[in-house]
Amino acid sequence: MKSKITALSLTGLLSVSHASAETPVAHQSVVGDKNHACNLEQGNVYYCKDCCTEEKKRLDSITEKLDHADEKLPQSVVTRAKRLIARNNNDLARKWLEWSDSTYSASFEETQWLLGNEDKKIGKNKEALMHYKKAVVLNEEKNPKYLMSAGKMARDYGEYEEAKKWLEKILQIRLAEKKNDINLAEASRELAVLYDDDRCKKDDQDKAEKLYQEALKIYEEEYGINSKHYATVLCDIANYHRRRNNYLKAEPLFERCLDIMGKISDENDPYLAMFVADFALIQKENGKIEEADQLFSRALRICDAASILGTDCDDIGMIKNNVAEFYESQERYKEAEQRYEEALSILKAKLSNGHKQIDEVQRNYDRMKQKMTE
């Protein structure tokens, strides 16, 4: 990752000087010497002595850093600075960069973050990720909201190393605040979701349950046990145990989730469909096919009603994928095909290509079509 570039650090590089006792003639640095000028735009360098080789290296360093400065400053600012340096107007270039830094630095990373939010709203997730990354880099990875946005989206696009670094960083920030509040709960849960993935190392996977439990405790204190926040993390823990075939722990947790949601939501709440579909998965894996079929049918009814009412949620695409997988396992291929196509249509309308959910559903659908041709 590129480090934060500031105008002050750039202007510090503009005063290129050197001294050599071996030099028989007096001369300025390559940057300022008109007789030994370095045209940065054309790359023409004229050497006065061997010592100027080091000067050229410094100039190359300045040029490289200016090339990356568009992460910090508008391109027009960077272009003007380069032209001033090429004309040996180093003092003016320094003043220009210092003024630009004070003018733009306070708002540029916030602008990147806001642009990311706007792109995310309209489904341009890859573009949003690019903006979030810039916000994080420019803020030296210290702003929690930038870290959270970049970390979650990097996780969704399978960039696990960067996601891990950013989500671990935000957890460190929240822990340092020494507040058991919603911010700490959110940081703990989002990092747990990252760790609770088959593609992560086992050591990280083992940390997930503890983080889930810490988030759950805070949500209980803040919202009580009859809340969507509490039920969501409880469902996370249930799925954590289900994926490890620990059904004795998972099943009662799913039942508690459904009990909570039954108290606080109506039957057409799309959020309820997620809990119903997840409970159906454990029934399927336990070999309780009839119970699973009934639960998946219930989840579909909720999803379809939510779509008609315009109240659908982000989980509907994956719910339909899970239903399709169930139908596929029962060799109900025509029904499975319909649900896979619906899932892909929903996800592609909301997410950019490369998102792990789109890739997962596409792999499942392709696998079934291959099976049908054999």
Image: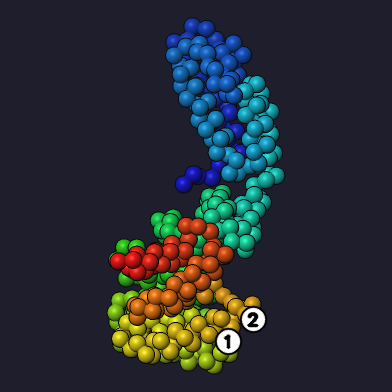
Question: Residue 21 is drawn in which quadrant?
Answer: top left
Position in image of residue 274 (x %, y %)? 48, 80
Inspect the image, locate mark 1, and give the three-letter code of the amino acid beneath it.
Asn
Colouring used for the render: rainbow
Instruction: Identify the residue at image location x=51%, y=27%.
Output: 60
Mark 2 Cα within 10 Å, few/some/many (few <14, many 20+)? few
Q: Nearer the viewer, residue 98 or 168?
A: 168
**Label 2 SS:** helix
Examine the rendered structure and indicate whether residue 7 appears above or below residue 256: above
Residue at image x 46%, y 21%? 54
Name the spot of residue 81 as percent of width and height, x first.
65, 31
- Judge whether 222 appears above or below 48 on screen: below
x 41%, y 67%: residue: 365
Q: Depth check: give the residue in front, 62 or 15.
A: 62
What residue would you read off at disc 1? 268
**Residue for point 57% across, 23% down:** 40
Query: In this orientation, which residue lies closer to the viewer: 96 or 231?
Result: 231
For the residue labelled by badge 1, is the local secondary structure a helix, a strand or a loop? loop
User: Is there a contact, CB below 8 Å, between mark 2 and mark 1?
Assistant: yes
Q: Is residue 24 above or below residue 70?
A: above
Q: Is 351 situated left or right of 240 in this image?
A: right
Q: CA distance from mark 2 to mark 1?
A: 9 Å
* 2 or 1: tag closer to the N-terminus: 1
Pointer 2: what residue?
309
